[in-house]
Amino acid sequence: MLLEGSKVLITGVLTRDSIATSVARIAQQQGAEVILTSFGRAKRLTERIVRHLERPAEVLELDVSKPDDFVALATQVEQRWGTLDGVLHAVAFAPESCLGNGVLTAPWEDVATAMEISAYSLAPLARHLSPLMPPGSAIVGLDFDGSRAYPMYDWMGVAKAALEATARYVARDLGPKGIRVNLVSAGPLRTLAARSIPGFDEFERAWASRAPLGWDVGDPEPAARACVALLSDWFGATTGEIVRVDGGFHAVAIDRPTA
Ligand code: NAD
């Protein structure tokens, strides 16, 4: 049991397909107690997902665009648990103008929203929750390769590059407290967030013809397992790292020749 006795806060559970839903399920199976966060009207959806988990989990309010929510969340977690061993950041959002060839046209207000929700939010999450986290605890975030330009991903790609840089700086600052900060860079997965990316099918085709291990866009389990592993002490000396769980897509330059 990788997370026996651990207390883990998990953001980003929205539907059964959410990567965070698989993380919550596997974390519980690995012995963790879990608190979820959700926000506004989405909270009812998250509470519905909880019924499909093996053990109950409370759902606390967190809209990462609301600074007061972070303060209230830290207070509530402290009241319930006192300490916290793990945090999953699985939050992303970009207005429509930012996706699908929007890099030259999206207005700054929309770009700012994408950056705030998808990249900056890691910093306040770490700032408010790290005082509850003892040495040996871990923060894990979900990433999609921010090192290259992809079709249609546009400002979300820029936000992911910013998330990667943010994770490195947060790792630098929390390392001396013994808190690890890492990202899992997953291949494309059919979730609600993915459905908002126009031309998502192109990602599916590209991964199918290039990833050496192959890739199933309907299976978030490999990415979720990597998150749980990074939350555990099996990665006790790893921080500021990006673990790619993409079937090996990043490692090869061109598609496999067709037979
Ligand atoms: P999802 O739609 O299930 O999850 C996105 C989550 O972000 C939702 O739970 C939503 O409620 C939350 N969110 C949006 N705005 C928020 C706000 N203001 N405050 C708090 N929460 C907010 O989709 P997912 O694919 O499971 O996404 C989870 C993470 O995984 C994201 O960071 C995403 O970029 C990343 N990721 C996804 C893929 C993919 O192909 N689906 C690949 C790699 C990485």
Image: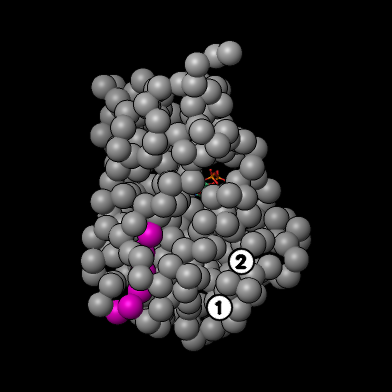
Q: Which residues are magenta?
A: 177-182
The mark nearer the N terminus, 2 or 1, is 1
User: Does the rendering let one see residue 220?
Assistant: yes
Task: Identify residue for label 1.
Answer: 6
Compute the Cα span from label 2 to label 1.
Answer: 9 Å
209 relative to 89, above or below: above
Residue 257 in the image, given as x and y percentages of width and height: 50, 16
Magenta-colored stretch includes residue 202: no
Q: Quadrant of the N terminus?
A: bottom right
Q: Indicate the amino acid at tag 2.
A: Ala
Q: Residues within 10 Å of mark 1 (few under 14, many from 20)?
A: many
Determine contact: label 2, label 1, CB under 8 Å. yes
What is the crowding at mark 2: few (fewer than 14 residues within 10 Å), some, or many (at least 20)?
many
Give the residue drawn at x 35%, y 43%: 160
Residue 218 is situated, as x and y percent measured from the top left of the image, at 65, 37
Residue corresponding to mark 2: 27
- The answer to whether residue 97 shows anywhere in this view is no
Drawn side of residue 18 relative to residue 254, left or right: right
Residue 98 point in image, percent of width and height: 37, 30
Q: How many marks?
A: 2
